[in-house]
Image: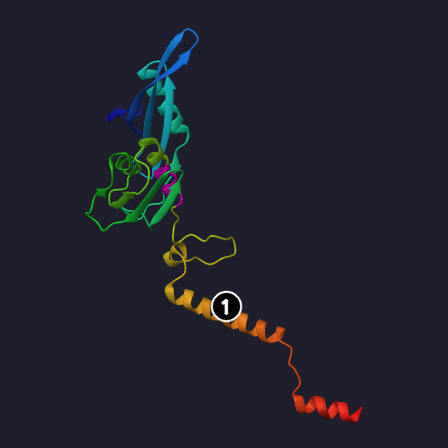
Amino acid sequence: MMYNRNSENRENSEKVIQISRVSKKTKGGNRIGFTALVVVGDKKGKVGVGLGKAPDVLSAIKKGTRLAKKRMISVVLKGRTIPHRVYLKKGAAKILIKPAPRGSGVIAGGAVRTVMESAGIMDVVSKILGSRNKINNVYATIEALSKLKNPRQSFKPNEDKKPLKAVRGLLKNDVKEKKKKDANKAGKSAKQKTVKTPKKAEVKIKNKKK
């Protein structure tokens, strides 16, 4: 179940992804309630998610919207897409998001698509690899978007600006060079530990002198 609700100031778009009916057994009988999963975003790089619980549907949606607005995060964008790929595992949910060329659109499932569109991402490729639970997938998507970093920003106060390759990790050549250096260091340390044993002839000569 998915429908849109425009906020009062119309700056943020509100989308209800899922409404579930829950019941709790009590002494007097079953207590029925509802949970609403709401995603709020301004389509300019800010998005949040909230799960509201209440005895009726409207109250659950209002609570979820209020929580989503409180927990909004800012997403780093690169034009219409994201700057780099992210793979994240959160509980049973595993999600992979990758940048896509212009015009590709949002290639993602229903819950993930809603989060991407609310954040203003127009070209992206996503794949859900773990749980099919919408709540888990939405929270995993929000956490994956929070992991995005700007390739031009410096990560330390006294550090020069790093390219996007620094965000993605070491290049294959750098990894190979690092392995070689580690192997050379290990070989040197092993040579230092080994004690040179004197030859048999030298031992005999020393014994004769004594």
The quadrant holding residue 9 is: top left
Q: Is residue 7 visible?
A: no
Question: How many numbered marks appear?
Answer: 1
* Residue 189: image location, x then y, percent: 58, 71
Horizontal arrangement in the rendering, residue 91 relative to residue 120 (left or right): right
Whether residue 94 is situated above or below residue 59 in the rendered picture: below
Q: Which residues are magenta?
A: 140-147
Whether residue 178 is situated above or below residue 12 in the rendered picture: below
Horizontal arrangement in the rendering, residue 2 relative to residue 37 (left or right): left
* Residue 178: image location, x then y, percent: 46, 67
The quadrant holding residue 204 is: bottom right
Q: Could you classify mark 1 by the number of other residues whose Cα lies within 10 Å: few (under 14), some (14-19), or many (20 or more)?
A: few
**Relative to the observer, which residue lies in front, 36 or 91?**
91
Q: Which element is circle 1 on? A: helix
| Render colour scheme | rainbow
Magenta stretch, main secondary structure, is helix
Identify the residue shown where x is 38% and y is 24%.
Answer: 66
Q: Is 99 colored magenta in this rendering?
A: no
Q: Is residue 107 visible?
A: yes
Identify the residue shown where x is 41% and y is 68%.
Answer: 176
**Relative to the observer, which residue lies in front, 103 or 137?**
137
Residue picked out by circle 1: 182
